[in-house]
Image (tube, rainbow, N blue to C red):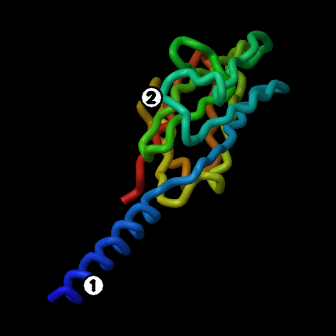
Amino acid sequence: MKKIMIIIFTLCLLLAGYLTSAFAMDDWESQLVVTSGNATTRLHFGQRAGATNGYDNQFDVPAMPGGTLKAVFKIDGRNCWSDVRPINGAASWDIEIDSTIPNAPVSLKWQSERFPAGLKLVLRDTATGDVYDMNGTNMLGFTSAGPRAFVIEAVVAK
């Protein structure tokens, strides 16, 4: 009986270790490149240990104003070029894009190969309600017509 209890205990420890490592995520970061005309803005987003869902001096980079293209993450009322969230699987990033050039093409490109395995990311256009699978594609285009808001949403894939 004692041997059976030891075997069951050992199996429980092994299973707990497997589940912890199977669902743990490492720090990750990707780039979102926004282009309109000759203007380009590079935004960085991801997840890191020690980050929060609010503004973090250590990880989030404030945006500098100016130019014909404004592409920023909105964090606690601040405009930022970088937005890092905590590692907990689910996360979201609020983005605002505005080109001062009327009816100009605007493109968004991202590095889907930098997304962690098991994490599904979608880009939601808050104006149209359209949702784009960021894991399955790496680009989106639209025509500028004033400020436009997007949300990147990350969920653990099932």
Q: Give the mark toward the camera: 2 or 1.
A: 1
- Residue 119 pos. (x, y %): 48, 53
Please determine whether, in this image, residue 155 is positioned above or below residue 153: below
Label 2, on which residue?
128
Amino acid type at mark 1: Ile
- Give the residue displayed 69% in from the left and 18% down from the top: 62
What residue do we see at 54% from left, 20% from top? 75
- Residue 150 screen position, x and y as percent: 52, 28
Give the residue pinned by disc 1.
Answer: 7
> Which of pointers 2 and 1 lies earlier in the amino acid sequence?
1
Above or below 1: residue 55: above
- Determine the residue positioned at 69% across, 40% down: 31
CA gap, disc 2 to disc 1? 57 Å
Picture quadrant of residue 1: bottom left
Residue 125 at what x, y percent from top left?
49, 31
Q: Most extreme residue toward the left, as rendered?
A: 1
Q: Quadrant of the C terminus?
A: bottom left
Query: Callout 2, which amino acid?
Result: Thr
Pointer 2 local density, CA inside 10 Å: few below 14, some 14–19, many at least 20: few
CB atoms of marks 2 and 1 within 8 Å: no
Q: Nearer the viewer, residue 118 or 56?
A: 56
Question: What residue do we see at 45% from left, 26% from top?
Answer: 126
- Answer left or right for 38 relative to 102: right
Describe the element under mark 2 as helix, strand or loop: loop
Crowdedness near tag 1: few (<14), some (14–19) or many (≥20) residues, C-alpha within 10 Å:
few
Q: Residue 142 location in percent, x, y? A: 62, 31
